Amino acid sequence: MMTQVGFLPEETSSFVGRRAELARLDTALATRRMTTLIGPGGVGKTRLAVRAARAAADRYPDGAWWADLSPLYDDALLLPTVSDAVGLADHTLRMPVEALCEWLSDKRLLLVLDSAEHLRAPCSHLLAELLTTSPGLTVLVTSRQPLGTRGEHAVRIQPLPVDGAPDALQLFEDRLRAGDPRAGLDAPGDRAAAADICRRLEGIPLAIELAAAGIGRHTVAQLATRIGTRFDAPVDAEDLTASRLDLLADDSLWPRRHRTLRTTIGWSHELCTPLERLLWARLTLLRTDFDEETAREVCTGGPLTPHEVDRALQGLVAQSVVQRDGTCYRMLDTLREYGRMWLAELGEERAAADRHARSFLGLARRAHEGWTGPDQITWYHTIADTHLDLCAALDHLLAHDVAGAQEMAGRVGFFWACCGHLSEARGYAQRALEAGPVEGPHRTRLQWVLGVAALLQGDFATAEKYGALCTAIALYDHDDEGMLGATYLSGLTQLMNGEPAAALEAAERVLRMTETAPPDGGPDGRRAIATDCATDTTFEPTTSEPGACEPTVSESGACEPGACESGGDSAPLESAHRLRCRLITVFALTALGRLSESGRAAAALRRACERGGEYWTRSYADYQLALIALLQGRPEASAAHARAMLAGKHRLRDSFGIALGLDILAAAIAAQGAGAQAARVYGTGHAYWRMVGHPQRGTPELGPVREACELQARAAVGDEAYQRAFERGQADNAEVGLAAALHSDLPL
């Protein structure tokens, strides 16, 4: 069983044997640019690839990176999946393959593509481009067949030896003890029976693991007898003892030479109860790891009640059909294929896809409602981690429930924009708008998502167009939230175009127009702003927990970090759109040089965000507090605010926000005279800017600040020392560089 840790999956069960194969792979990785592990399903290609990649990882300065292709049913998400795997969150309008090639062009890394057999042609084409443009790239692929890429070196993986070597028997015993630590092969005849099982199963690791999971319902001797009887029986259409799925199996996926594994899975399938078999089939719709609640939502129906789903799920875990890691579950691709055949035989494919789509539409609704609240970080990560399932649900809804697709694309769009999935956010929003008529908030939300995605990609003309459309539609619909969202989009576009006065005027006007709280006073209610942000003379009370340190405002109007405030505020939480609209006023005031007003507005906004646990807008309030302090000549305070911003953006995995934060932190460090440290942070920031595919971005007033601080840093240490430190920061692993930047005693 594996969980995702770092760049490679973590091994959480024992690894047995394979010394010769590991030696061959180590040599291949050292001498070949592309190696493909080939062999039938269940032979252990994935585990071998993990072990080989981990052993070789230190040879690659830019790391070893893993992309699991098994959940992809076609090549539509191949490029986004590989880009995610190597840390690229492109924010540009370039073709995705162009962005990926540019990102990898100067890197020395190992890229592992797992389970590529169903995408052989697209993978071959992609790797041909990557290997041509990225001379430092080494690729390891697992597939049932070679991809056919020029220069590919194929290494065939055989099952574990069963005669004269203990590996297969050791695997059986390890898995037996993993299921029950008290189990073993100590009874008379058990070891011989287990060896016979391994021979019957031809040393295929997955088959052995499934057989070991059958102990508990049978003794080892009984299991050997049952397997022997089954494997000795002829398999043909007249054989009533053969699994129905054995006869239905597609020979293109399950060729006759792989009868052993197919028969073993069929035998495991027959050991399941009818409800376990049904759950096995229905779970195959899930592309990513899932929890019990998701299993209930996607699989409940007919005889499978929620309670029966829970029972059947534990039964599948006990039989190693489903793997469990803490609260998460997953199914191996080989077993998922078998379950899909059973789902088709039952005639349940459409009904199962409907349930899957409804479940993830519900997830999108809950995440959207939870954006401004204490679970924002959790929802943000959930949307990122279930990306493939959300895309699959959207594709199904676009074909069968246009209204549902329109709602879903609008609700997940901002999450995707923040996660760096700009192409998907924009593409699905466009498809949803074109799929059929849509009115009211769903239309406004879709157009807003299109505009935000375009803005983040640097397409200001499109962003301006959709900002105007959203404004007109929200006015027509009398939609206050739509107006706030449209103003945020239009205001940010104006700021990027160097028009802060226009952005400020519009934001102030809309905030006043929408300031009346609704009668129900619910969690999405809006409340009156005590004063206009441009002339803020009163402040909302802080809601920091006692002892929590928050920025406060000095007598001069400048915001000072570290002053502790306590107390509470019973005011209702503000909506996400309102908080973002207030952020526009802060940005605009700073751009106009009205720093005292901007500092007060930013501090008040930060407290409003903190009340509900909102991190995304709060981090940008911290960013503005850092910029304001820097412009006021308080670099120590600026650095403290910048690190607070970076901590928030790191929790959100917001690469674009991290890049901005590193720039302002470097400037604050440079203003303190620490030129080498500033250069290193600038270098790490440059790595993050490359990660999002842009040169340094931000509102126009940031350019002169960056230039002045870089000159200051160079003057402090000299050009040569500055360049060395910059290159070190640029060469650091991005996470390592960020962790170093977050410490105030940044080493040289």
Image: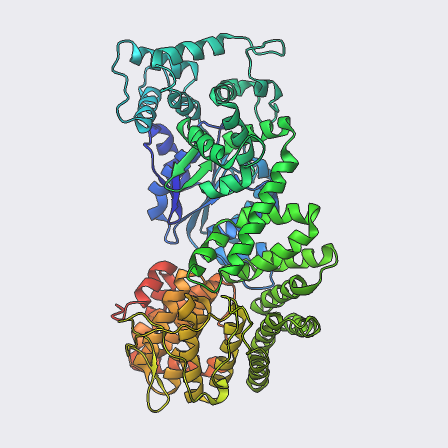
- Percent position of residue 540, x then y: 41, 80
292 relative position to 80: left or right: left
Q: Is residue 26 above or below residue 104?
A: above
44 relative position to 512: left or right: left
Towards the viewer: 199 or 425 = 425
Mark yes or no: residue 568 visible. Answer: yes
Res. 737 image quadrant: bottom left
- Percent position of residue 720, x then y: 33, 74
On the rendered image, what quadrant is the C terminus found in? bottom left
On the rendered image, what quadrant is the N terminus found in? top left
Residue extending farthest front: 519
- Give the residue drawn at x 45%, y 33%: 313
- Give the residue drawn at x 62%, y 49%: 394
Q: Is residue 727 above or below residue 45?
A: below
Residue extending farthest right: 437
Towards the viewer: 260 or 140 = 260
- Percent position of residue 617, x then y: 46, 70
What colour scheme does the image use? Answer: rainbow
Res. 673 image quadrant: bottom left
- Percent position of residue 384, x then y: 49, 53
Q: Is residue 594 above or below residue 74?
A: below
- Give the residue drawn at x 42%, y 24%: 210
Res. 683 image quadrant: bottom left
Residue extending farthest bottom: 556
Towards the viewer: 449 or 259 = 449
Q: Is residue 741 above or below residue 28?
A: below
Give the mark count. 0
Mark yes or no: residue 718 visible. Answer: no
